[in-house]
Image (cartoon, rainbow, N blue to C red):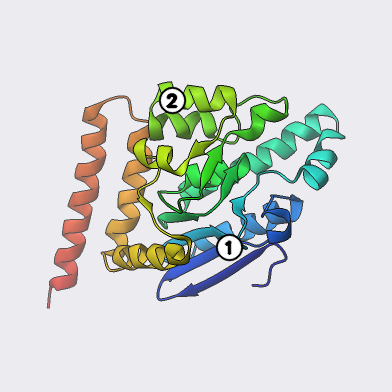
Amino acid sequence: MEFETLLFTEENHIGLLTLNRSKNLNAVNHTMIEELEQVFELLRTSATCRVLILTGGGEKGFCAGLDMKETAVEMFAQPAEDIYLYQSRMSQLYYKMRCLPQPIIAAVHGAASGAGFSFAMASDVRIITPEARFNAAYINIGLGGADLASSYFLPKLIGIGRANEFLLTGDFMSAEEAMNLGFASRTVPRPELLKTAFELAGTMVSKNPAGLRMTKEAINQNLGLPSLEQALHLENRNQAFLIAAMKLQNQP
């Protein structure tokens, strides 16, 4: 598929999705929203792609958030009900990311602000460069700091105390803070960013495809479960299913 704002390739069961508006710091506009919806639908039903790497094109940064010169101006000019529909459509991108069967590795360099921060939060693993930085920019433009799933993801990733600070101030989280808080799992030099992401994706791809998918599903479900008992039920079901499937595969 050909896209205006994205690049997508797949090789050896690994998909590489690049936000490709580098002249605009990969800011999200209406076309990018539409094209991300198309890619996510393609991945949702893909029989070949097992892991997805998400990165930003160009050298300046991962994603500057919503394109204020284009999309934001257009959206703010609409009636309240249309603004709500647009906001809901954009926010669904992050729900779709969590629903994808593929684990998502965010490879982040430079700034990930606003919507870009949410892309990183909605991913399963974050690999960053020393220059990476993150902020909930929404509050800095007069809106609420809790936007695009940030109030759901960030407290779960770094704890409610520090999450509150970032969401209420709009201050940047540095690469060092991201590592110390457990937000990112690895820091690597910029030239090694995609190489490291592909190595990690390769390790995941080498695992049982069903096990990989069901692990992501279990993590998603257990994030919202109120009890240990319910978490154990889900894990036990998955493991029993996978063991039974392995037995069937090994039968002569």
Image-quadrant location for residue 236: top left
> What amino acid does circle 1 point to?
Thr
The spot of residue 159 in percent (x, y) is 38, 27
Crowdedness of circle 2 by 10 Å Cα count: few (<14), some, many (20+)?
some
Foreground residue among 194 and 37: 194
Q: Which mark lies nearer to you, 1 or 2?
A: 2
Foreground residue among 233 and 10: 10
- Of the numbered discs 1 and 2, the one sitting upstream in the chain is 1
The spot of residue 195 in percent (x, y) is 41, 68
Question: Does any portion of residue 91 appear in the rendered image?
Answer: yes
Image-quadrant location for residue 11: bottom left
Side (left or right) of 44 relative to 114:
left
List the residue tagged with mark 2: 162
Foreground residue among 78 and 107: 107
Instruction: Please say if 252 is above or below 44.
Output: below
Q: Residue at coordinates 14% horizontally, 65% vertically from top-left? A: 247
Where disc 1 sits, the SS reads strand
Side (left or right) of 185 relative to 113:
left
Q: Which quarter of the figure is the N terminus placed in?
A: bottom right
> What amino acid does circle 2 point to?
Arg
List the residue tagged with mark 1: 18
Q: Residue at coordinates 14% horizontally, 72% vertically from top-left? A: 250
